Amino acid sequence: MPLHHQTRRVPYSAEQMFDLVADIERYPQFVPGYREARVLARDGEQLRARQRVGFGVLSACFDSEAEFDRPRRIRVRSRERPFHLLEIEWHFEPEGSGCCVRFRAEFHLAEGLAARAVAPWFSALNAHLADTFIARARVLYG
């Protein structure tokens, strides 16, 4: 089961980084391979979203659930194909004038053509996902 960890110190506040990661509907604008991200339901500190990811002509669609503890933590889970299990956690800890961003992703893909097609892309994406969001923060916050 692939597991990715990243820890980065950034000059942005925990609130800014939290808001950036929580804004799932904007992922297709800057996260490589994200074709669609739509919020299906919100209930307090939880939301359900549908996402379509892929590369080339191959793509996969799945629903996920996110729990928010603003501005400290975001937890995302899915057990829907192409995943058997997907768990992502973001932690944002104030540090000086910025914050420390901790990212952890663990996933196990289900059997099938879509999962095999998405596997290399998804593993590469998670290996650099925190850096992708930090690059977006530079664009948005300077």
Image (tube, rainbow, N blue to C red):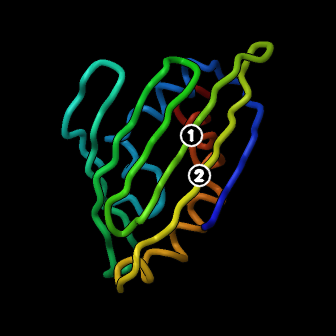
Which residue is drawn at the image coordinates 40% and 47% (left, top)? 27
Picture quadrant of residue 52: bottom left
Residue at the spot of label 1: 89
**Residue 55 drawn above or below residue 28:** below
Quadrant occupied by the C terminus: top right
User: Which of 63/32 is in front?
Assistant: 63
Residue 58: x %, y % from top left:
33, 79
Q: CA distance from mark 1 to mark 2?
A: 6 Å
Q: Residues within 10 Å of mark 1 (few under 14, many from 20)?
A: some
**Residue 74 drawn above or below residue 63:** above
Q: Secondary structure at mark 2?
A: strand
**Horizontal relation, residue 125 to residue 34: left or right:** right
Which residue is drawn at the image coordinates 28% and 44% (left, top)? 49
Image mark count: 2
Residue type indicated by callout 1: Glu
Which residue is drawn at the image coordinates 36% and 21% (left, top)? 45
Q: Which mark is residue 131?
A: none
Outermost residue, top direction?
96
Residue 32: x %, y % from top left:
48, 60
Residue type indicated by callout 2: Ala
Q: Residues within 10 Å of mark 2 (few under 14, many from 20)?
A: many
Dots 1, 2 in contact, CB < 8 A:
yes
Residue at the spot of label 2: 105
Q: Secondary structure at mark 1?
A: strand
User: Which of 73/13 is in front?
Assistant: 73
**Residue 103 drawn above or below residue 142:** below
User: Which of 119/99 is in front?
Assistant: 119
